[in-house]
């Protein structure tokens, strides 16, 4: 079976602001009809890398540096890439003076869409993103989740092959977040390739086929979220809420079975043997601990010594 060619190829990319490296020797590729996610804390270089891909930010000049998007280099063919891509920025940059339909109609003119064609596409997208009833509502009357869905609809107007989303669900309530995730899964099933940045571990786990974990502009690790969890970290974690509580458990730890991660305060205990952690928890009150499965934040903590929500 022939493997599909990547639609994005990035090799040895750097981006500097003065002496600070926003992106440091990054390489990866994105296969068609998949969701590829950059996961990392604020300031990790995720947004900068995204902007390099669609031409809004320039990479440093290096002989070995390559960025190829649909066969184009964004340094010289930014417009061609933009016609093939839809971009959802971090900020909801909608026109507050216009209503929902008018925001989309004005944007359709940038792509030379005829009135009838634009009308049909707008109707479809408003229905797809569950905004049909808000068609004539002014932007300032919409909730945050509705505005976010409208920005996604706008990015999809010209039927792009690549959808780029920068922190698509930041600040939204869980119900809206899950709705957007479901819509992104549907788009991927229809053949659209999705590229996103996020610092939400659950978002990356729920919708990404591949994640690239970043820290200080560099790749920490890359792969399927599930496979990374299976291969790179223990299955279970025991958190305690007070340092004194952990102190009482330390004498009972078997280092061959349980790993103590002291980069977190209080430390977190990890093990593939859930019963070993349960036996420790038996010495604590229910309100003193949390026994759970390990997640991508634990993986990031193990790899970097920092939590995903820390500032750079």
Image (cartoon, rainbow, N blue to C red):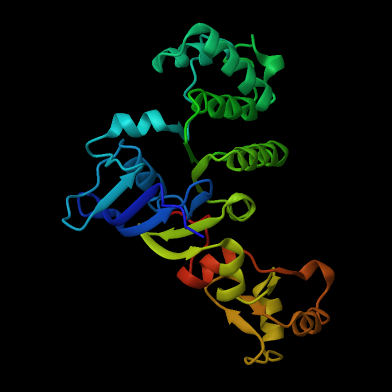
Q: Would you place residue 223 above or below residue 118 in this image?
A: below
Q: Is residue 89 left or right of residue 241?
A: left
Q: Would you place residue 301 above or below residue 17 in this image?
A: below
Q: Would you place residue 197 above or below residue 121 in this image?
A: below
Which of the 4 quarters of the picture holds residue 266? bottom right
Q: Residue 135, percent across and down?
A: 65, 12
Residue at the image point whose x is 57% and y is 18% from the top: 121
Which of the 4 quarters of the picture holds residue 283? bottom right
310 or 5: nearer the viewer: 5
Residue at the image point whose x is 56% and y is 25% from the top: 153
29 or 237: nearer the viewer: 29
* Residue 96 visible in the picture: no
Task: Count how many numbered circles sit on residues in the image.
Answer: 0
Q: Residue 296, percent across and down?
A: 58, 63
Residue at the image point whose x is 46% and y is 16% from the top: 107
Q: Quadrant of the C terminus?
A: bottom left
- Which residue is outermost to the front? 1
* Residue 15 visible in the picture: yes
Q: Residue 298, percent across and down?
A: 58, 67
Residue at the image point whose x is 47% and y is 9% from the top: 114
Q: Would you place residue 20 above or below residue 238 in this image?
A: above
Q: Residue 27, percent across and down?
A: 34, 59
């Amino acid at each position: 079976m022939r493997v599909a060619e990547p639609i994005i190829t990035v090799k040895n990319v750097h981006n500097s602001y003065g002496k600070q490296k926003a992106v440091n020797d990054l390489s990866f590729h994105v296969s068609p009809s998949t969701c590829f996610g950059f996961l990392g804390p604020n300031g990790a270089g995720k947004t900068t890398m995204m902007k390099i891909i669609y031409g809004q930010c320039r990479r440093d000049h290096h002989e070995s540096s390559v960025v190829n998007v649909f066969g184009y280099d964004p340094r010289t063919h930014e417009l061609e890439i933009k016609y093939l891509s839809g971009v959802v920025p971090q900020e909801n940059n909608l026109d507050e003076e216009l209503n929902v339909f008018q925001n989309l109609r004005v944007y359709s003119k940038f792509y030379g869409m005829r009135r009838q064609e634009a009308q049909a596409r707008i109707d479809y997208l408003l229905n797809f993103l569950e905004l049909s009833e808000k068609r004539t509502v002014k932007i300032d009357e919409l909730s945050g989740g509705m505005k976010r869905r409208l920005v996604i609809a706008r990015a999809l107007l010209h039927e792009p092959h690549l959808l780029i989303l920068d922190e698509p669900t930041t600040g939204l309530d869980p119900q809206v977040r899950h709705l957007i995730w479901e819509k992104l899964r549907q788009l991927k099933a229809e053949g659209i390739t999705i590229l996103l940045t996020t610092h939400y571990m659950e978002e990356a786990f729920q919708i990404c086929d591949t994640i690239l974990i970043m820290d200080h502009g560099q790749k920490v690790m890359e792969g399927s979220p599930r496979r990374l969890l299976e291969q790179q970290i223990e299955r279970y974690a025991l958190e305690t809420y007070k340092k004194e509580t952990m102190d009482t458990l330390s004498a009972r730890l078997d280092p061959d079975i349980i790993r103590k991660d002291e980069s977190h305060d209080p430390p977190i205990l990890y093990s593939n043997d859930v019963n070993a952690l349960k036996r420790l928890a038996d010495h604590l009150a229910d309100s003193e601990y949390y026994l759970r499965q390990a997640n991508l934040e634990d993986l990031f903590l193990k790899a970097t010594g920092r939590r995903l929500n820390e500032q750079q």
